[in-house]
Amino acid sequence: MLITCPYCGPRDVIEFTYQGDGNRERPQPASQDLDAWNAYVYDRLNPAGDHNEIWQHSGGCRAHLRVVRNTLTHEISSVAFARGDHKSVARHKTEGKS
Amino acid sequence: MAEYSAFSLLKNALTGNKDWKPAWRKPDPKASYDVIVIGGGGHGLSTAYYLAKEHGITNVAVLEKGWLGSGNVGRNTTAVRSNYLLPANTRFYEHSMKLWENLSHDLNYNVMFSQRGCLNLAHTPAQLDDFARRGNAMRHLGVDAELMTTAEIARLVPALDVSATARFPIVGGLMQRRAGTARHDAVAWGYARGADRRGVDIIENCEVTGFLRDGDRISGVSTSRGEIRARKVAVAVAGSTGQVMRLAGIDTMPIESHVLQAFVTESLKPFINTVLTFGMGHFYMSQSDKGGLVYGGDLDGYNSYAQRGSLPVVDEVMSEMLALFPGLARVRMLRSWGGVCDMSMDGSPIITIGPLPGMYLNCGWCYGGFKATPASGWCFAWTIAKDEPHDINAPFTLDRFHRGLVIDDKGQGATPRLH
């Protein structure tokens, strides 16, 4: 599997570290909404199809990336910098496909 | 269908083996059942078996999308053990071990359960201390465990590199003698035959496409072979839990699906007579009765529903194997395959009533579902029949995450790929 880092170009997956589901929204640090914290920590969409996830190019430029990858085929449809994107980039809606 | 016995073996041998009957029927689905079990894997079949045997509920259908043995029950590496640290896990897996010890007799089907032991290798004094603690915790609950020295390990597994110059020198290990392996396909076939003989309908090539509702209550399923109604619908679909729950309108679960690869070499003469795990990486190995070395390592590390793995993990597993057994460098790998594991957020399973009325859920087996097969079905059948959990599976609820009652044996936190 190759991931095309916006800085470094296409690199083998072994250079990257998976940081997990990119759909989760972290509550504000001062939030006392336990349901929101529980959902953030434990609940996952886990789609069979396009999955919105965070990877770090830990063996390269070390940037955090937002990657949309198909969990059935491992095809990658988009890679972008993750910095500050929970505001600037629309949340990718994932749909189950089979 | 007749009992299998020495006499039936002899009789059929004398008549040219022409009179053996299929081990289970191929019925068409009825319009309704008392219980529908979705998923004809090890856990679904054992659930149906114990519903019939322990609770007298025989009007049961097991619905399988493919054919029996096509999912995880045919993709695992057959190890059986109960060497856990936390009491909830130890009690559950030890219940399973006790069922394993009598399973061939109970099913009248040889599942080739072999108590050849399971040895966890330690590579640092701290790791050995940790194993001593786990061994003590096990013995407190009546499970066998013993610490082994390097010299004892060298006698037990002569091919292992126990020298001081090994990449990760071995300082000892924790052995559970009663652990071992079983023939995975025989487990599926034995449970299928046992359930079928008690009247359970096992319906293959029947994919569930939706749930039927009566008000807010689940009252059946729609399938590729028509609608089937039931008072109780039990879900035991391992790697497909997320997809099946989405059919019921539940979009998020405390689960991620990951792929785990396994490998087998060409057949060798007897090489290793225990299940062995490596303590410095993620590697485990045993030898099948046919002679192939069966081994595997870590998850690929990212969500996947593909029943195949990636090359970096192949590379890592082979490196770990050679760090332990330099003598295997020229042995050829025969096959590799992948299974989809539903990794829960604390590494422990979920066996529970709900989450919807009329529904029962069995999932979150991570990559350790095979050894749990008997107890999983036994506890799930109890929960379905009595509408309450048995003491043994009471801690394994779906809401334990939100209630702060996680059962995290490895202490990894909510990062499923690390369990």
Image (cartoon, coloured by chain):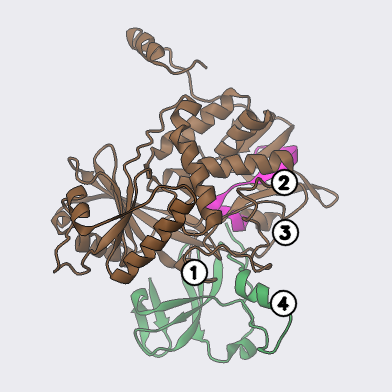
Mark 1 Cα shell of 10 Å, populated few (<14), some (14-19), many (≥20):
few
- Which residue position is annotated with label 2? B388
Amino acid type at mark 3: Gly
Asked whether residue B225 is drawn in magenta, I would say yes
Identify the disc placed on residue B120.
none
What is the chain letter for disc 3? B
Q: Which residue is drawn at 35% across and 37% down?
A: B114
- Which of discs 3 and 1 lies nearer the camera? The answer is 1
Pointers 4 and 1 within a single chain: no
Question: Residue A46 location, x and y as percent?
Answer: 58, 65
Question: Residue B240 location, x and y as percent?
Answer: 56, 54
Identify the disc placed on residue A34.
4
- Which chain appears green? A
- Which residue position is annotated with label 1? B411
In space, the residues marked 3 and 2 are separated at their CA atoms by 24 Å
Residue B302 visible: no
